[in-house]
Amino acid sequence: MTSTPDTAPPSRPAGLKDVAALAGVSHQTVSRVLNDRPRVRVETRQRVLDAIRTLGYRPNLAARALASHRSGVIGVLTASSLFHGQASMVLAVQAAARRAGYYVNVASMEQPDPTEVVSILDHFRTQPVEGVIVVTPDDFTVGRAAELAASVPVVLIAAETPAIPGMAAVNVDQYAGATLAVEHLVAAGHRRIAHLSGPLDRFDAQARRRAWEDVLAAAGLPADALYEGDWTAAGGYAAGRALVRDGPPGAVFAANDVSALGVIRALAEAGLAVPGDVSVVGFDDLPESAFYAPPLTTVHQDFRAVGVQAVDALRTMIDGRTVAVPAITIAPALVARGSVADVPG
C-alpha cells in the first residue's frame, strides 16, 4: 500500500508564460516590461507588474543572459567606501541599478593603488558586466577606465573629467559648491580664509581648491593658507593644529564635513571658539552635520540624484542609443547653520 504524503510537492516557480497569461499579454510584452523597454502602454505595464507581484515571479537571470547575451550586471569601482561621499554615491548607484533590474558588482579599494585598479578593471573586462561605473577616480584610474571604455560602456562619477569616447561623466558641480562656500565666508566679512583640501590627486579636491583660489582672487584676498588633507577627521585635526601654529585665519573652508570636525576639535583645544574666533564651512552635508557643536554650515550634495543619473547614462550607452552621453552636472546648495559668524564692521 502506497502512503500519501502529508503535503503536496511544491509547485514549480512561476514563469514568463504564467505572467503573460495572468496579465493577458504576450510573453514579448512581459519581456519588454522586465527590460524597461519603450512602446508599452502605461496600463499594460501596470497589469504586467501586478501579475509579477501576484505570482512572485523571479526572472531567471542565467537563462536571460544566454538568450539575450546580456548579463544584467554592472560593475562599480570606488576608491573607498569608508568616506561618506563615496559610500553615499555607491549606495545610490546600487539602489538605482536595482530599480532598473540590474545587479551590481562592487569593488572597493581602501586606498587607490595602480596595481589593484588594473586588476579590478581587467576583472570587469573578462566578466559579463554590461557596463562599469567608476566613483571619484584619480588621473591614473581615468586613464585605465578609458582603455576599458573601448569595449564596455563606462560612466565616471567625478568632477570635470575630460571628454573621452565611450565614457560619460556625472557629478555634483564641485567647483560651484566650493564657490558657494567661500563666497559665503567672504560675504560674512572674512579676509583670511584657509582651505583644508582633500587629496589633490582627486578631481573633486582639485575643483574645490581652484574655486577657493578663484573666489579669493576675485575678492582681492590672498590664497596663502592651503593645507592638504585626506578627507578624514584625523587629517582635519592635524591640519587644524598646523593652522593654529601658523597663526589662525578668520575662517576655514574644509574639504568635507568629516575633516571639518577635526578642525573644530583642534581649534577648541587651542582655546579658539567656532564661530566666535574662527568660522568653519564644510562640504557634503552629512546627516550628523546639523548636530555638530556648533551646527555646521556646509554644501549639500544630492547623492541620490547622482546615482540615478549615472545608471540612466550607463543604460543609455548599454542600449546603444548613443556611444557617449554629455557630461551631467547636478547643482549643489549651501546649507547655512551656526558655524559661520559675521565679522564686526
Image (tube, grey):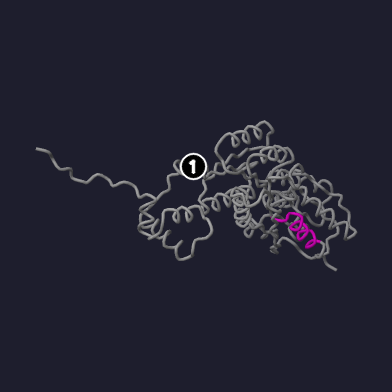
- Rendering coords of residue 17 (x, y %): 37, 52
Which quadrant is home to the C terminus? bottom right
Is 28 displayed left or right of 336 in the figure? left
User: Helix, strand, or loop for circle 1?
Assistant: helix
Which quadrant is home to the N terminus? top left
Is 118 displayed left or right of 246 in the figure? left
- Rendering coords of residue 304 (x, y %): 60, 56
Count of labels shown?
1
- Sort mark 1 into few (<14), some (14-19) or many (20+) by Cα contacts within 10 Å: some
> Is residue 173 on the magenta stretch?
yes
- Rendering coords of residue 255 (x, y %): 73, 50
Q: Is residue 122 above or below residue 271?
A: above
Pick the residue in front: 280 or 90.
90
Q: Quadrant of residue 29?
A: bottom left
Quick one: which residue is furthest to the right in this view?
Answer: 220
Pick the residue in front: 12 or 271.
12
Pick the residue in front: 176 or 162.
162
Q: Quadrant of residue 144?
A: top right
Pick the residue in front: 319 or 170.
319
- Rendering coords of residue 86 (x, y %): 63, 47
Quick one: which residue is furthest to the left in this view?
Answer: 1
Quick one: which residue is furthest to the bottom in this view?
Answer: 345
> Is residue 135 on the magenta stretch?
no
In the picture of the structure, the residue carrying the numbered disc 1 is: 65
Q: Which residues are magenta?
A: 172-185
> What amino acid does circle 1 point to?
Ala
Q: Residue at x 48, y 54 (%)?
A: 32
